[in-house]
């Protein structure tokens, strides 16, 4: 299994304060607000619920008892309750929530590797704006794909994956020949960004199609990944710094 551990792109000239802040906020939310992902009430309140985005209002449902088929243990799954905030804001709040330690760690690793150079190239404020806009667009892509393909509109969607997919797309456009370093057993393998990220995107498309065909998606919102990546490709050149002609 290949795991990214860094890149060979050390040309940045500024401290990536936005990238570091995003990582810190995501970790803070996961630990102190989500309770390491165990606070399901918080998750249901601030994750993106497709049905709520489509109707523009809170949806109230009753709780239900779920029995784990493996352990036989039962637990209560909370119903949806009004939060008092506009439902469209969950497209933003969901970006800072994660379903587990692995989900958080993987996203923050990719953001740490690629975010600093993208931030340096397009500027701190533009980078934050780019991140948030693409994250919102990725959430909308998930919402409408859920509607179009007849999936459960009440299943919450959360995670920074859509926004980080846009950061990966921006990195590929801005630094196509810079190499991302992967670790595999006893080997370190540097791969050009255009190859590594390009393969990653093709895997998202392939897995997304497979999920539509009945394969298990493992709770992964592939439409959000794909939508965020495409948004990043389309928008990055509008956000990049203009270089002087002389």
Image: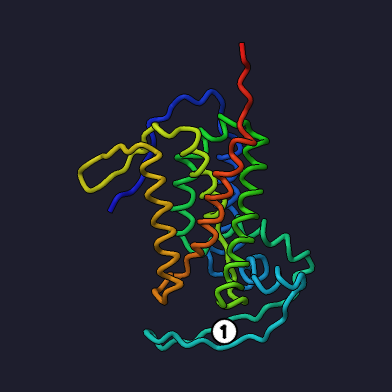
User: Of residues 73 and 215, which is closer to you in this image?
Assistant: 215
Residue 112 percent location from the top left of the image = 48, 41
Query: Is the residue 132 above or below the residue 224 in the image?
Result: above
Outermost residue, top direction? Answer: 246
Report the residue marked by disc 1.
Answer: 76
The residue shown at (56%, 52%) is 228
Question: Quadrant of the image for the C terminus?
Answer: top right
Query: Is the residue 107 above or below the residue 62 in the image?
Result: above
Horizontally, is 56 left or right of 145 in the view? right
Residue 190 percent location from the top left of the image = 30, 37
Mark 1: secondary structure: strand
Residue 185 percent location from the top left of the image = 22, 48
Residue 191 picture quarter = top left
Residue 209 picture quarter = bottom left
Question: Quadrant of the image for the N terminus?
Answer: bottom left
The residue shown at (37%, 38%) is 180
The residue shown at (67%, 74%) is 51
User: Of residues 151 and 33, which is closer to you in this image?
Assistant: 151
Residue 48 percent location from the top left of the image = 64, 66
Residue 157 picture quarter = bottom right
Q: Tell me, what colour scheme is on the image?
A: rainbow
The residue shown at (62%, 67%) is 144
Q: How packed is label 1: few (under 14 Cα within 10 Å), some, or many (20 or more)? A: few
Horizontally, is 118 left or right of 113 in the view? right
Horizontally, is 53 left or right of 235 in the view? right
């Amino acid at each position: 299994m290949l795991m990214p551990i860094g890149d060979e792109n050390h040309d940045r000239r500024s401290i990536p304060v936005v990238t570091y802040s995003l990582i810190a906020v995501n970790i803070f939310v996961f630990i102190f607000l989500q309770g390491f992902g165990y606070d399901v009430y918080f998750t249901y309140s601030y994750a993106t619920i497709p049905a709520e985005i489509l109707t523009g209002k809170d949806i109230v449902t009753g709780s239900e008892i779920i029995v784990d088929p493996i352990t036989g243990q039962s637990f209560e799954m909370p119903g949806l309750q009004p939060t008092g905030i506009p439902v469209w804001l969950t497209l933003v709040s969901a970006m800072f929530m994660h379903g587990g330690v692995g989900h958080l760690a993987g996203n923050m690793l990719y953001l740490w590797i690629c975010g600093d150079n993208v931030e340096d190239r397009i500027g701190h404020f533009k980078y934050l704006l780019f991140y948030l806009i693409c994250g919102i667009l990725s959430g909308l892509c998930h919402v409408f794909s859920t509607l179009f393909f007849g999936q459960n509109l009440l299943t919450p969607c959360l995670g920074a994956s859509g926004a980080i997919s846009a950061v990966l797309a921006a990195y590929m456009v801005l630094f196509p020949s810079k190499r991302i370093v992967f670790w595999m057993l006893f080997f370190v393998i540097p791969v050009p960004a255009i190859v590594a990220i390009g393969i990653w995107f093709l895997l998202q498309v392939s897995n997304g199609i497979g999920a539509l065909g009945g394969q298990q998606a493992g709770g992964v919102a592939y439409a959000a990944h794909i939508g965020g990546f495409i948004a990043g490709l389309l928008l990055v050149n509008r956000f990049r710094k203009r270089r002087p002609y002389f």
